Image: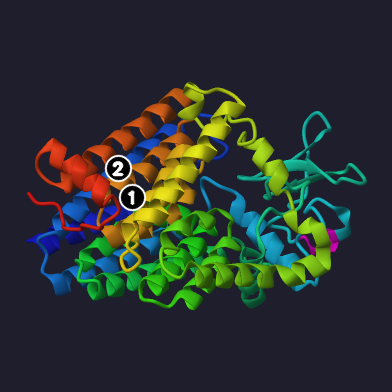
Amino acid sequence: MRIFLTSLLLAASTAVTAVSVTALPFYDDKTGRLWPLVALTGVLWVLFALAILSLRRVPLRAAVTLVLVGSVAIGGAAMAGPPNTSTDSARYAWDGIVQNAGVSPYEYAPADDALEHLRPDWLFPAPVAAADGELACEGSRIMKSAEPGSGETICTAINRATVPTIYPPAAEIFFAGVRLVTGPEPEYWPMQLAGLAMSLGITVILLRALQNCGRDPRWAALWGWSPLAATEGVTNSHIDILAGLLVLVATLLVSNGHRWRGGIALGAAISVKLIPVIAAPALLRRQPVKVIFASIAAFALLYVPYILASGIGVLGYLPGYLREEGYSSGERFVLLSLIFPGPAALVLAVLLIGVTGALVWWKTDPADPWVGQLVMIGATLLIVSPRYPWYALLLVPIIAMTGRWEWLAVPVALTVRLLIPSTDLARLAIALAIVLIVWMSFRRAGPGSGGRLAAWLRHPFRAKAELPSD
């Protein structure tokens, strides 16, 4: 009965995922159709929670099969339509296309007329004349821009088409690899398929790692069935999923004593997207020099060919992006800015992340760094409070390794922030996530409030991962 019920919930999640991708676009919403997408996203998270609860009583062998089958089904459904809440994968495609033509992605902006001969029609559809004679751009996710030199109107699916890419070299190598296989003409499915392959790879690694650590492999479902992995890792194909995979591998390697190889994986993760640097403190408790040296060497080596091609241009649009997103002014820290507005929020955020990193480094068990990793990554996301839930693709595999399901409140809060543009609601969602995490942390510490606090202070990052009881 439990197997049947869990299968039914997974089938429902698969169907709702497909509907949310194909029928309810986030862009071009002019008739209030955004709210059905918000509602269906809520339904997906509810179905996910019910499926996890149902999985507890499924026999282990059947549970492992369900985890794998559910991951394939939900991830496959996420490929049913094009990206629906982000246009980032259009930039991924373009960066891959220009590299395979022998051009550095840091050299030119997509709108630059020097690259006009490389533009595929699906990324750069021709503008059409509107009734008033002005040129207009038609189609979902298509934006109007202008060539920097000539000023001529162009239509493109690429966001920020007038500035160079923001992505570090490991991401760029991955983009080029995908487009080397498929060529420039296929639209969004190549990156979606790559995202699905990485998502399934993470599920398989989690199943094996949990079993090797003596933990319940059912926890792998926290990743494999997660709405975040499906929608942001597959549908929207965010490169953060590659960073999450590499951080998972790095943590596994270091915890098993392979510090050189773990450092290389960490350096590669950082060169996918710089934010994985926050995974370092939990990996530096024992023989940190090996991890640090290997990660710096891997990071630098990946940058060499791009520095030779573009020099300082390898920074791309990163400085401008940080200003645009409000991190340099402190406006983007929604919870901190409530009390410390302006640049003071940035100073406090840096201080809090630094203190968290120091505590994680000091208290983490080098043979079992998972909860330290969880606290470091999760706390950083709560402090920084990005508008983009796909940043939490770095966190969810670590949640699965620890079994601390309450930290899923972080990607839920970030999803709320993306879909409903309300600062007050974002503050409430993040505050509720913090309350849930703190409450569950004390509950896990043991009976008696004094004993719980003392135990937490002694061993704040020791993993304790049992499936929740009835």
User: Which x, y percent locates residue 251?
Assistant: 41, 67
Q: Is residue 388 left or right of residue 329?
A: left
Tell which residue pokes out farthest to the right in this image: 150
Residue type indicated by callout 1 = Val
Residue 82 is at least partly visible in this image: no
Residue at 39% from the left image edge and 52% from the top image edge: 360
Element under disc 1: helix
**Which mark is drawn over residue 7?**
none
Residue at 41% from the left image edge and 68% from the top image edge: 286
Residue at which label 1 appears: 16
Q: Main secondary structure of the magenta part?
A: helix
- Looking at this view, is 292 or 120 the one in front? 292
Residue type indicated by callout 2 = Val
Q: Quadrant of the N terminus?
A: bottom left
Q: Is the residue 352 above or below the residue 72 in the image?
A: above
- Looking at this view, is 315 or 158 the one in front? 315
Q: Which residues are magenta?
A: 115-119
Residue at 76% from the left image edge and 67% from the top image edge: 306
Q: Is residue 147 left or right of residue 447?
A: right
- Looking at this view, is 398 or 220 the one in front? 398
- Looking at this view, is 390 or 385 the one in front? 385
Residue at which label 2 appears: 43
Residue at 54% from the left image edge and 73% from the top image edge: 264
Q: Earlier in the sequence, mark 1 or mark 2?
A: 1
